[in-house]
Amino acid sequence: MTEVSTPHSGYHYNGAKRRFFEGWYFKVTLPGEGQSFAWMYSIEDPAGDSKFRGCGAQVMGPDKAYLVQHTDNTRIFWADRHELVLGACFKGKTGAVPRELLDGDRFTRTVEQGYQAALTWHQGWPMLLVFMLSINQLLLHTETTKPSKRHIGVETYEQLGLINQARQSCAAVYQDSVLMYAGTLESDDSSAAGNLPPTVKSVKWAYSTRPIYGWGDTGSDQKSTAGWLAAMPVFEPHWQVLMAHGLSTGWIECDGKRYDFHDAPSYSEKNWGGRFPSKWWWVVCNTFDNPDVALTAVGARRGILNIPGVEEDVGLIGIHWQGKFIELVPWTAAVSWEIAPWGQWKAWAKGESYEACIEATAGPDDGTVLRAPTEKQGLIPLCQDTFLGKVRLQLWRLDKHGQREGSPVLDTSSTSGALETGGGPWPATWTAQAKMQQPLKSIVQIPIDVRGIAEALPGDLLPPGL
């Protein structure tokens, strides 16, 4: 199994007093159902001295199901600065709030409502996650990688008691027998902003994931989604795809209705900064009739250099297919789009070797409203999503003159794409071409290995997030 860990897997908060959020998104699509579940975790103003401070979890499910659990107590949240390791305790069984990854027994004794998550292990009680990587990935990775400040070694996991628990849990999942852990996320929007009440009371889940694609070629170092400048305080916000495609096995129970699945397509990403873009669109699909294809596409009006009122329209189309990553980004390709406020998405990108076209549609009543971070209002209802998008992707190979070489090399469709529009105002179709500002467009093309540099730094000098 191939390492798919991406840059920016760690927690980026550096202690500054300015507005800050970080969010994590995980999605699994139910085979045969044409429906998905998505979990969105967020932390805002973790210093805890602003009126927008908060720690929250949102869940979106089939039939426009929506659940939110939120608190303004940011001290319940913790995360590792350099690895995908985080957790929160909404309600504890003892006075102490965990600030580190706990073994299963200790976590159950300590936490009544909360979660903990790691690159290879996610757990919650009464909510549970077991997804990002299976235990087989953990064993292979730690046997072939020397433990370092960036990797938790097998010995560490043995001390935490997680190796044997993960073996048993993953075995239970794949054998469709009773899981070692199960849990529930209970709705609580009492501290959440905006009039967006939950439509379900509880969600239980447990599943493991075998990653297929991160953000890059199979077998190669994975990339920063926004290029190496994402390591600098340049863009507002930053964004990173953590896993473009994986296969998950387990179960989910929503208000008593249970969904069992095996090798269900899954996806994860994260973002961080002071706020979301002022407006954006998003298309994610790894459920095409060609099952090896994973598409991620986005367009956004984002801030730059943290200067008020200074924004730029940027977008990209990323395609994983046959072990390769086709990256059409605004510093090497022409990216443009026509996106309605809701219902229709069209995007094109043309690079040196490939040209891609995306067309997607959704019904007028398919959208589910979700909350997103804003600079001046906090976490408020700001976007709408659907898991029922009809998506068509076409890809052409180009000759040395930039002309299409005949018919598309890839033409594939889906009826279960994830689509989103957000921000605004958005009174009419948004027609735009990505225009990355200079000198940033030229600077981002300089081949700088930020992650390699970071690996060589002493732990106390590593920037948070890398």
Image (cartoon, rainbow, N blue to C red):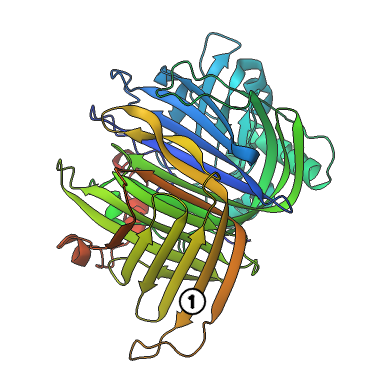
Residue at the image position 66 percent from the left and 29 percent from the top: 203
**Residue farthest top in this picture:** 95
In-front residue for pair 245/448: 245
Residue at the image position 38 percent from the left and 29 percent from the top: 379
Up/down of 30 relative to 357, above or below:
above
Q: Is 270 on the left-hand or right-hand side of 333?
A: right
State the count of labels. Answer: 1
Give, as a three-letter code, the residue at label 1.
Leu
In-front residue for pair 16/255: 255
Q: Which residue is mark 1?
A: 395
Whether residue 285 is visible here, answered yes or no, is yes
Q: Is 230 on the left-hand or right-hand side of 291?
A: left
Residue at the image position 34 percent from the left and 60 percent from the top: 315
Quarter occupied by residue 412:
bottom right
Q: Position of residue 370 (x, y in %)?
A: 47, 36
Whether residue 219 is visible here, answered yes or no, is no
Q: Position of residue 390 (x, y in %)?
A: 57, 59
Q: Position of residue 215 (x, y in %)?
A: 47, 60
Quarter occupied by residue 17:
top left
Q: Is 82 on the left-hand or right-hand side of 386?
A: left
